[in-house]
Image (cartoon, rainbow, N blue to C red):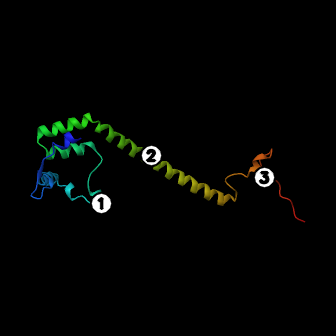
Amino acid sequence: LMELIKLLPVKVDSEGKTVFMEARVREAAQRRKEPCVLDLTPSNVRDYEQGRLSLLHRDVEGILERHQAEYFVSRLECARIRSGFEMREELINYKKALYLLYQEGMRVEKDLRQLTALCHCPIVARAADRDRPDGGPEPRQQQG
């Protein structure tokens, strides 16, 4: 990773702070007509595309010289970054599938509650009723 970081175009300002080539980053964002990543805050993070390897490639190619960008991307491939992005995508798909199952379960539960209220019967039989040979409830005893 440090090898890749050394490729990034940086300069040191008069105060000794390392500054990324802000102008290149802002120019690349302006060419794409997108908000600049340097202006990212927790409140506007949803305004930015994220989560795809192609975005990383695009950003690197927009900031670095061509030969540096090619080397950077090749090193990312060696570091198995692609498999990390693929795993992320699979986890998101799994989360969506689980959410759909949850929603369907909630619909079934609602339908069962409505049917139970309509039929005036419990959804689950009592343990004593299950133990009877005929499977029905015990007969009510008349008071009297």
Q: Amino acid at mark 1?
A: Pro
The extreme right residue here reads 144
- Residue name at image x 28 percent, y 50 percent: 50
Q: Is residue 71 visible?
A: yes
| Element type where label 2 sits in the image | helix
Left or right: where 25 falls relative to 126: left
Q: Amino acid at mark 2?
A: Ala
The extreme left residue here reads 14
Which residue is disc 1 drawn over? 42
Which residue is disc 2 drawn over? 97
Name the mark on residue 137. Answer: 3
Q: Residues within 10 Å of mark 3 (few under 14, many from 20)?
A: some
Residue 83 position, x and y percent, is: 32, 37
Residue at mark 1 to residue at mark 3: CA–CA distance: 60 Å
- Residue name at image x 16 percent, y 53 percent: 29
Residue 98 position, x and y percent, is: 47, 47
Q: Of the residues tagged 1 and 2, which is closer to the observer?
A: 1
Q: Are marks 3 and 2 in contact (CB under 8 Å)?
A: no
- Residue name at image x 29 percent, y 60 percent: 42
Left or right: where 36 falls relative to 102: left
- Residue name at image x 17 percent, y 51 percent: 32
Q: Earlier in the sequence, mark 3 or mark 2?
A: 2
Residue 124 position, x and y percent, is: 68, 52
